[in-house]
Amino acid sequence: MTSVRRIVVGATLVLGLAACKKDDARTPDTTPAAATPATVVAAVGGACPRTGHWGDCQLRAKLEAAGLAPQSTTEKPGDLPDIGVTPVMLSIGNAGLAAYFFPDTLGRQLAAAALDTLKFIPQGKLVGVLREGTVIQNDNALVLLF
């Protein structure tokens, strides 16, 4: 067997075994890619319940793992819409976050469809000079970044 072929076969076996050992695919990974031992213990040790959906704890853990320091705040970061769910307010440096957690993806999709597209810009589009909020959506979470 040539050395290139051995590498390909070895890599295939390692990836195959890793795929077989993976937990339920619906459960999000709460362990950051470049985690320190303390964050791994906190994430795996049950600091956040593993529900398969976003919640306040999961959002804070991901932000902290990314090297950000989210702080709870009562100040509204901008003109927030009334979409039926009370948002979790966070500040990160001079940015503000309003995170809405819905029971399911459909609830989040319906709320996102009701947002004013002049005030809330979809993720990936450039924000203008009017201080629009950026809409970030994933599973049951709708986050407005100001």
Image: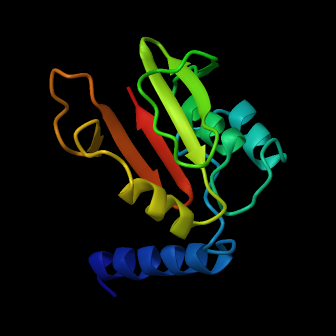
Placement of 94 over or under 27, stated as above or below: above
Q: Residue furthest right?
A: 46
User: Is residue 15 toward the left or the right of residue 22 in the image?
Assistant: left
User: Is residue 26 toward the left or the right of residue 137 in the image?
Assistant: right
Quadrant into which the C terminus falls: top left
Q: Out of 4 and 140, give the one closest to the viewer.
A: 140
Q: Out of 17 and 19, give the one closest to the viewer.
A: 19
Res. 15 visible in picture: yes
Q: What is the quadrant of residue 119 in the picture? A: top left
Res. 66 visible in picture: no
Percent coordinates x, y for residue 129 in the rendering: 16, 21
Q: What is the quadrant of residue 47 in the picture? A: top right
Q: Out of 80 and 129, give the one closest to the viewer.
A: 80
Percent coordinates x, y for residue 78 in the rendering: 42, 23
Q: Residue at x 66, y 44 (%)?
A: 58
Q: Residue at x 47, y 41 (%)?
A: 143
Specify the color scheme: rainbow
Q: Residue at x 78, y 40 (%)?
A: 41
Q: How many marks?
A: 0
Q: Residue furthest bottom?
A: 1
Placement of 37 over or under 23, stated as above or below: above
Q: Residue at x 60, y 37 (%)?
A: 87
Placement of 11 over or under 108, stated as above or below: below
User: Is residue 125 toward the left or the right of residue 102 in the image?
Assistant: left
Placement of 41 over or under 142, stated as above or below: above
Q: Out of 137 and 118, give the one closest to the viewer.
A: 118
Percent coordinates x, y for residue 115 in the rendering: 36, 48
Percent coordinates x, y for residue 51 in the rendering: 74, 61
Quadrant into which the N terminus falls: bottom left
